[in-house]
Amino acid sequence: MNAVEFILAGMLAAATPFLLAALGEMVVERAGVLNLGVEGLMALGAVIAFIVVYHGGGHFLGFITAGISAALLSLVFAFIALGFRANQVATGLAIGILGQGLSALFGKTYESLTVKGLPKIAIPGLSEIPVIGGLFVQDIVVWLSLLATLVIWATFAFTKTGLVIRAVGENPKAAHAIGYPVIGVRVAAVAFGGMMAGFAGAYASVIYTPLWADGMIAGRGWIAIALVVFGTWLTGRIFLGACLFGAVSLMSLAAQATGLDLPSQLLSSLPYLVTIIVLGIISADRRRLKMNGVASLGEPFEH
Amino acid sequence: MSIPVFAFLPGLVRRERASLAATLLAPLGALLVAIVLNLGLYMVMGRNPLAVLHAMVLEPFLSWASFSEVLLKTGPLLLIAQGLAIGFRAKVFNIGAEGQFILGAIFASAIPIWFPQATGGWIWPAMLLLGAIGGALWASITAFWRVRLNANEILVSLMLSLVAAQFLYYLLLGPWKDPNGFNFPQSVMFQYDAMVPTLITGTRVNVSLLIALAWSVAAWVFMQKSFIGYKLQVGGLAPRAAGYAGFNEGWAIWLSLLIGGFAAGLAGAAEVAGPLGQLQRSISTGYGYAAIIVAYIGGLHPIGIVISSVVMAVIYIGGDNAMVSANLPIAAVRVFQGSLLLAYLIAVAFVRYRLEWPHAAHRSPS
C-alpha cells in the first residue's frame, strides 16, 4: 500500500470526529450561538463511551450514553449563556475546562486500557477499484456520519426547520416577532451540537483509536470549531474541510512510516499549523465571510 | 410571544442601574456554590467531603510553609490575568496565554542554556525581559492574523498554544535536553545567577511576586487613569462609537495582545528562573487557562484580580493537599475551576438583571 492509498483508505475514519463535531457546531452557530466548549464536550463523550464499552455495554450503548451526557453538559451551557445571557465566549471556555476535567476524573482508572473497535464494511464492487477502493471500506459509524451529513444538508436546503434555525440566527428579533420561540430553538440547537460532539468523542475513543488516554482529544474540538469557519457555515464545505484534516492527520503518520527524518513534534503540530494557515487564508476574504456568516452570532437575545 | 412550556419560569428584567452589591457578592457567591457542588461530587466519588474541605480550604492557611506556596503560585496567575483582563475589556479574546507563557519560559531559558558559565547580577533580569519579549512575539502572530487576515483570535491563539507545547517537547527531547539527565525531558539546572532572588528567606517566594504586584498597579493606572486605557475600553464596549471617535480597532488589538503576551511571557520566565530552576515539560500546570478564570472572577478589574489570583492559588495548593491527604485526583482542580467560572457567570447576571416571577410580571405595568 503506498502513501496515497493509505491516506485515501483512512481519511474518512480520521475525518469522522472532526466532521461530527463540526456539523454539530455549525447547527449551533447557524442558530446564532457560539459554543466554544466543543473540546470538553468531546472529551466527556469520549470517556463515557470508553467506560461503557470497556464494561461490555457495546458500541451502540456507548455512543448513546456519550451523546446524552455531552448533550446534558451542553444544556448547562445553554442554561447559563441563553438563560442568564452570560458572555458566550467565557461560558464556552468554562464548559470546555469542566468537560476536560470531568473526563480526566472519570477516566483516571482507565488510563492506557484498550477496547475493541468495530469491523469495517466493504461496499461490494466499489471497494475493489484500484487505488480509491479503500474509500469504500469503512465501519458503520463512518457510513452513518455520511448519512447525517446528507440529512443536515437537506434540512438546511429544503425544510422549514432549517429555515427557522437560520432565521433565529440571522435576525432573532424578527423571528421572535413572527412568533418563533428564539430561545427554544437555540436551546435545541445547542443540545444537538452537544450530542454530535459526544458522538465525535465516542468515535475517537472507541473506534478510531480504541484506547483511553487523558487529553486524547488533543485539540480536535477546537479544530472542529475552526472547520465551521473554513466551511463558511455550509455543510458541503465543512465535509471537505473535515476530509482535509483527516488526510493531514494521516499524512503525519505516513511521513513517519516512510522514514522521513522530521521531528515527531513537528508532525504532531501539523494539524494546528494547517488550521492557523487555512484560517488566515479563508478569513482574509472578508466579503465571503460576511456573505455566509451568521449575523447575530454570539449575541444574547433580549426582547 | 413567550413559550407556554416555560411560562412558570421567572424572567430576567434589566435593572435601571448596575447593582454594586451584586458586583461585589457575585464572586463570593460563586465560590460558595462551586465549593458546595464540588463537595457533593467528592461525596459521590466516595471521598470524605470534610477531609477534602479541610485540605483544600484550611490547610493552605494553617502553616507559613504552605501559605508561602500560595504566594508563590499567586505570582504567575496575577501577572497573566492582569494582562488578559486588559484585552478582555477591549473584547480581544486572547486565550492563548498558555502558549505565550511557554514561549516566555523558552526564551528566558536560552540565556542559561547557551551561557551556563555566565555570572553576574544582570542574568535574571535579562531572562525576565527576554521571556516577556518572547511571549509578546508569540502573541504578535495572533495579532497579525487578526488584524491583517481577519482571522478569529480565539482559535489562532489557542492553536498556537498547542504548537508551543509541541515546540517545548521538541527542545527538551532534542537540542536542549540535559546530556546527564538520564533521558528525562528537561534541560540542565540553571546557574545561581539565573535565579530570581528570594523575597522571603526560608520560602520559595521570590521577587517576581513584587513584579506581579507592581504590574497590577501599572494595570490599574493604565485602565482607570490613562487615555489609552480608556480608548481600549470604549472600543470593547461600543466599537462603533470608538470608530467614530477615530480610535483604531487594529491598534487596540495589537496593544491588547502584546500586553497579554508580554505578561504571560514574563510569568513563564519567572517560573523557570524561580521555583523550577530549569526548563521542564511540566513548566505550566494550566496557568494560562486558569488565568482566564482569574481575570473573569476578578471582574476584569485590577484590584479584583489581585484577590481572585490568591483564591485560584489556594485552589491549586489545596488541590495538591487534597491529592495527598484525601486521595483526590488532581483533575478535580480543573473540574473546580470550570464550575467556579460557570457559577460566577450566573451570579454576575444579577449585576445587570433581576429575576421577576411570572405572577409579579402580570401586575407590573410595562
Image: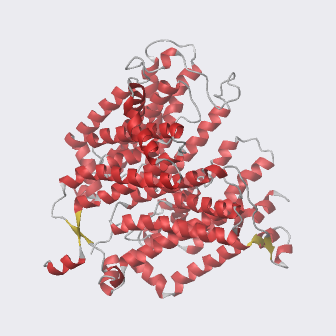
At which x and y percent is residue A11? Answer: 72, 64
Q: Nearer the viewer, residue B360 or B291?
A: B360
Give the number of marks: 0
Q: Nearer the viewer, residue B185 or B125?
A: B185
Residue A22 shows up from this direction: no
Q: Which of B242 and A198 is in front in this view?
A: A198
The residue under the point 35% across, 46% down is B295
- Against B53, residue B74 (above or below) is above
Farthest left residue?
A: B365
At which x and y percent is residue A87? Answer: 35, 60
Q: Is residue B88 left or right of residue B240?
A: right
Q: Is residue A234 left or right of residue A259?
A: left
- Against A161, residue B96 (above or below) is above
The residue under the point 57% across, 51% down is A104
At which x and y percent is residue A185? Answer: 42, 78
Q: Quadrant of residue B10?
A: bottom left
- Against A201, residue A142 (above or below) is below
Quadrant occupied by the N terminus of chain B: bottom left
Quadrant occupied by the C terminus of chain B: bottom left
Q: Nearer the viewer, residue B8 or A282?
A: B8
The residue under the point 73% across, 55% down is A114
Residue B125 shows up from this direction: yes
Q: In this view, does B18 lie to the left or right of A156?
A: left
Question: What's the coloring here?
Answer: secondary structure
At which x and y percent is residue B159? Answer: 53, 50
